């Protein structure tokens, strides 16, 4: 393996020359108490830390960053912490998705503009993983991802509670009058007991596992619970490894091959992944130069069964159980027939080497391939006149009787209208109604909020109804469940067919056939299309204005057009 020499380090351009500029760079390092021996000729490792006082899932990053630094120093590197926007999923409004590309841009530019040779990316809470990875791909520096790890299981009255999924479930019970105010407030202090990300198979657990499957973490890293001391050791090991990756010039392009992305799609299907995985993986693959799209997910879904028995696709277990059952390496060892194990990981070893000795310790948590929890994969991509560019659903988390369904639409023009009407006792709705929410896509939302798990109308909840067909151009939380059809593309705000639906129109969904149809004659649809008013601008200044002009549709991964790798000539290294 060829190894860089110290004068070949990128940071050497700032620190090594005997010239006026380098005098300034070194004297200002001296100002902070560092001697030249500390950093000149050593790999300078940027630690992009998405900690903040508002990010509950990254609360431990303030300590963990010290462990990463310890590892970098042990391996002879020089650690530099660079904070980035932290994107707390539960608090940032209207949605963190508005800011995923902001974090991607920030990561790319932090790495490009500073005298750094490689990076440790610290993230995990939903959009932080794709944001950091997108930026690192474009920055083209060696980078290892440190996943925040799942939080401990929730607990209430001796029952296990899962992030998101149980909040939704018991909220419906409360709306139905089945649990008391006291129960509800006890749940509030029991459902999130430690730092770390949501411990169901939500977007965070999905995306950190996919970062691992892509080869961007140390093998096994993503399943370690945040509060487990193995997590601390993993952080130090990642710091050490980042230094080695710089000497070996192990840049993202060497890890992120098309086969690596195909492996990630297989893993996503077998885990019962969050629907958000589609958007983020498409965006990441395209940045890495591979034209993956929705059909690649659907094709994998037909081959790969869901074998991770984690809620919400699974019926019982959470990420902590998954770790004790062997974690992602155990799952990947079961998936070997579907994977290309020659792919390289951040460890410098192939997946085949990394999986040696991997074993499943609980066959109910990680099922054998012939005893899956769902015989097909986690996602289905539907197309038809209502979604010409596709839409996504999670059949494994839906009531089976709704997978083939036709019913009259009840249309909500936007989220405030939905919120104002859904609990009314006079709502004209039956269990067969198809609930439609529009103006909730990338531009219309704006930012494509997680509104796609439209609540079951209260009058039906009281009758015991717990699932209905719901269609929107929104996303939904990965912890959500139900027959929710999402990401309808093109979105209604830009005149997609969802904008043409009227209450009472019949919509037919056939998941096994992968179709979604609005039963209205084409002539009538053309007539309605011609009468559509132009949409109101969502922003007239600021970041949102830029977002509105450059955001792509869901099936394209919602990247900004100007961030795409093929947008123009590559960005040059900065002049010094
Ligand atoms: Fe951070 Fe769910 S709120 S991962
Ligand atoms: Mg989420």
Image (cartoon, grey):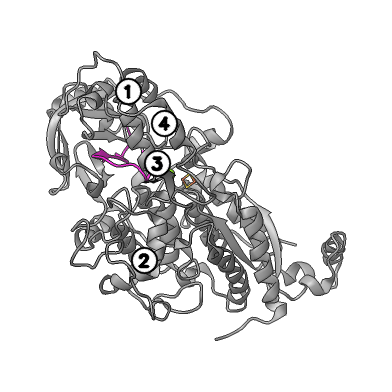
Spatial CA span between label 3 and label 1: 40 Å
Of callouts 4 and 1, the N-terminal one: 4
Along the line of sight, which residue is nearer the eye, 254 or 44? 44
Along the line of sight, which residue is nearer the eye, 388 or 447? 447
- Residue drawn at x 53%, y 62% as measured from the top left: 145
Residue under pointer 1: 413
Asked whether residue 142 is in view, the answer is no
The quarter holding residue 517 reads: top left
Residue 406 appears left or right of 444: left
Spatial CA span between label 2 and label 4: 31 Å
Within 10 Å of the Cα at label 4, are there few (<14), some (14-19), or many (20+) other Cα atoms? Answer: some
The correct choice, above or below, for 215 with respect to 474 in the image is below
Residue under pointer 2: 325
Of callouts 2 and 4, the N-terminal one: 4
The quarter holding residue 482 reads: top left
Eye-nearest disc, 1 or 2: 2
Within 10 Å of the Cα at label 2, are there few (<14), some (14-19), or many (20+) other Cα atoms? Answer: some
The correct choice, above or below, for 158 with respect to 177 in the image is below
Of callouts 4 and 3, the N-terminal one: 3
Of callouts 3 and 2, the N-terminal one: 3
Residue under pointer 3: 157
């Amino acid at each position: 393996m060829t190894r860089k020499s110290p004068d070949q380090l990128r940071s050497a351009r700032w620190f090594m020359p005997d010239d006026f500029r380098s005098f300034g760079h070194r004297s200002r390092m001296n100002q902070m108490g560092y001697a030249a021996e500390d950093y000149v000729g050593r790999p300078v490792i940027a630690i992009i830390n998405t900690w903040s006082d508002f990010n509950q899932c990254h609360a431990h990053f303030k300590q963990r960053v010290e462990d990463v630094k310890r590892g970098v120093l042990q391996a002879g590197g020089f650690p530099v912490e660079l904070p980035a926007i932290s994107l707390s999923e539960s608090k940032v409004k209207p949605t963190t998705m508005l800011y995923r590309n902001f974090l991607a841009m920030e990561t790319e530019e932090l790495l490009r503009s500073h005298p750094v040779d490689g990076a440790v990316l610290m993230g995990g809470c939903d959009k932080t993983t794709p944001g950091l990875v997108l930026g690192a791909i474009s920055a083209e520096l060696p980078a290892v991802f440190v996943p925040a790890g799942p939080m401990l299981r929730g607990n209430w009255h001796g029952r296990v509670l899962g992030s998101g999924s149980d909040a939704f479930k018991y909220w419906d019970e409360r709306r139905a009058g089945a649990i008391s105010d006291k129960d509800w407030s006890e749940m509030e202090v029991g459902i999130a007991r430690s730092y770390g990300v949501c411990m169901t198979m939500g977007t965070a657990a999905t995306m950190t596992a996919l970062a691992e499957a892509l080869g961007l973490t140390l093998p096994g890293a993503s399943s370690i619970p945040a509060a487990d001391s193995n997590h601390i050791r993993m952080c130090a090991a990642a710091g050490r490894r980042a230094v080695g990756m710089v000497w070996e010039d192990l840049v993202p392009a060497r890890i992120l091959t098309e086969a690596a992305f195909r492996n990630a799609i297989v893993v996503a299907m077998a885990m019962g992944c969050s629907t958000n995985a589609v958007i983020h993986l498409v965006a990441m693959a395209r940045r890495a130069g591979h034209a993956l799209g929705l059909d690649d997910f659907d094709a994998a879904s037909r081959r790969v069964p869901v074998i991770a028995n984690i809620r919400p696709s699974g019926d019982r277990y959470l990420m902590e159980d998954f770790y004790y059952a062997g974690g992602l390496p155990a799952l990947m060892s079961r998936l070997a027939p579907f994977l290309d194990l020659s792919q390289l990981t951040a460890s410098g070893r192939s997946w085949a080497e990394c999986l040696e000795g991997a074993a499943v310790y609980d066959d109910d948590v990680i099922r054998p391939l012939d005893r899956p929890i769902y015989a097909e994969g986690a996602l289905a991509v539907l197309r038809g006149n209502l979604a010409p560019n596709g839409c996504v659903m999670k059949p494994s988390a839906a009531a089976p009787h709704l997978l083939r369904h036709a019913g009259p639409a009840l249309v909500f023009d936007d989220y405030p209208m939905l919120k104002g009407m859904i609990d009314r006792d006079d709502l004209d709705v039956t269990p067969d109604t198809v609930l439609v929410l529009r103006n909730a896509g990338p531009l219309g939302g704006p930012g494509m909020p997680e509104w796609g798990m439209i609540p079951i109308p209260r009058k039906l909840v009281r009758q015991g109804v717990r699932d209905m067909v719901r269609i929107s151009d929104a996303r939904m939380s990965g912890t959500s469940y139900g027959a929710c059809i999402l990401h309808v593309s093109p979105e209604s705000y830009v005149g997609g067919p969802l904008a043409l639906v009227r209450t009472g129109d019949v919509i037919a969904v056939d998941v096994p056939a992968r179709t979604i149809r609005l039963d209205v004659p084409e002539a009538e649809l053309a007539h309605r299309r011609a009468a559509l008013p132009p949409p109101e601008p969502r922003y007239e200044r600021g970041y949102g204005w830029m977002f509105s002009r450059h955001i792509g549709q869901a099936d394209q991964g919602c990247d900004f057009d100007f961030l795409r790798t093929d947008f123009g000539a590559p960005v040059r290294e900065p002049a010094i």
